[in-house]
Amino acid sequence: MEYLAATSFTTLSSSPASLLVLAIILFYFIQSHKNVKKHPLPPGPKPWPIVGCLPTMLRNKPVYRWIHNLMKEMNTEIACIRLGNVHVIPVICPDIAYLISRGYLTTALSPSGDQWNKMKKVLMTHVLSPKKHQWLYSKRVEEADHLVHYVYNQCKKSVHQGGIVNLRTAAQHYCANVTRKMLFNKRFFGKGMKDGGPGFEEEEYVDALFSSLNHIYAFCISDFLPSLIGLDLDGHEKERVQQWKDGAKKDTEDLLDILITLKDPNGNPLLSKDEIKAQITAVDNPSNACEWAFAEMLNQPEILEKATEELDRVVGKERLVQESDFAHLNYVKACAREAFRLHPVAPFNVPHVSAADTTVANYFIPKGSYVLLSRLGLGRNPKVWDEPLKFKPERHLNEMEKVVLTENNLRFISFSTGKRGCIGLLQAFTWSLPPRQSSIDLTIAEDSMALAKPLFALAKPRLPPQLYPGY
């Protein structure tokens, strides 16, 4: 029996076909191990079995600071942190970010394919087209005028012809009003104050809204994907959808009407309720950049003076600044770009989810990985920016003949809604530090990217009284 077994084995081993099979298996085994060595995971902390680095993450709050400090210690621009079974890949390198930035329910989250193409077409044809932009012009102007009117009334309350203004409140409520006016054709939630400011209900509503926005990018232990899918702003969306179904509404008044009434070639609704919600919650938020820009300029009055001088030169003092003036306000736009770069509204962009195993920058990215483009890391990368922690608008003037707010090279991630209102504050008022205050404290809040304390500043009217709305 032993002789037969040995003979069979010898015959099998010497068979050309068997040797070929063994050679192929050996070849693929070697190649697979070579590929692993050639394309390792990005550097990162050693994970625990099953839970990964979750225990470490829970001990280090806020999580974004822990991640950025970790990358700084490892001297890397891409890392891999395993949380549970998910590989989280933070990126602070513009070149790598550009490779990854083609991505996934909203246009920012849809993978390339039918869903992505549909959402892109909706935005470009029905929401962001020049025709629709002009159609909503009066709504944007109305809210910008309300903002100037509100600040002007704060000044009138003071016997010194100047008023202390909470710029965080002014900027946040302006941005919320612009968004609601365009989406819902509605300004305040509840009744506003006679001076143009928000009422009690509105203050509570906006506080809750911005608190929710602060949590969008938080690391959730369950799935690490921040979401506002369950949020329907004051129930207005469901009500409006029902109005169109019942025939109570027949004319489009705002963007929400446009999104609801879009039809596919077969006459069916083009967007689902979830897709409409995704577009609403994706509206950008420039109020954080506005508050930070004013804080930085108040600490560097020469920058504030240059911006005001440009407004006087381009626009003058006989009319209020208009959207058509923006193209000629290079220094003002440079200040806005610098605020977006240095003070992003959130530490990370919405995650890109890897749909398959892939290789980026010679690193292996497993299927299902959450790739995070770091707004904070991209904007403050010392390999990209000279003196990255300094507010220096001139850096953008040196780079381009005409300054634009978008950043195509992904050295930072910006937004651009609400420009006229924030620039209108710069033109209409002289701003200075409150009495008995030598500088603005630029400490960052623990739970968000906002200033730790709301920004208060002294505003004084600098234009002829008849120019102020509601005078």
Image (cartoon, rainbow, N blue to C red):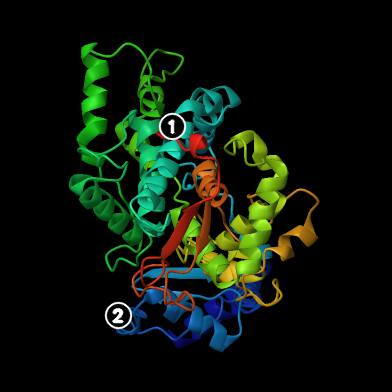
Q: Position of residue 359 (x, y in %)?
A: 62, 64
Residues packed near mark 2 inside 10 Å, few (<14), some (14 to 19) or many (20 plus): few
Q: Is residue 242 above or below residue 379?
A: above
Residue that protrudes farthest toward the front in the picture: 159
Residues packed near mark 1 inside 10 Å, few (<14), some (14 to 19) or many (20 plus): some
Q: Is residue 15 left or right of residue 196?
A: right
Q: Quadrant of residue 398?
A: bottom right
Which corner quadrant holds the C terminus? top left
The dot on residue 190 is: none
Q: To which residue does mark 2 refer?
A: 58
Which residue occupies 55% across, 72% down? Answer: 299
Q: Position of residue 394 (x, y in %)?
A: 73, 64
Q: To which residue does mark 1 refer?
A: 142
Which corner quadrant holds the N terminus? bottom left
Give the Cα distance between marks 1 and 2.
45 Å
Q: Is residue 273 above or below residue 379?
A: above
Question: Which residue is nearer to you in this view: 123 or 21?
Answer: 123
Q: Secondary structure at mark 1?
A: helix
The disc labelled 2 sits on which kind of residue?
Answer: Leu
Question: Which residue is nearer to you in this view: 462 or 150?
Answer: 462
Q: Is residue 65 above or below residue 136?
A: below
Q: Is residue 71 left or right of residue 437?
A: right
Q: Is residue 255 visible?
A: yes
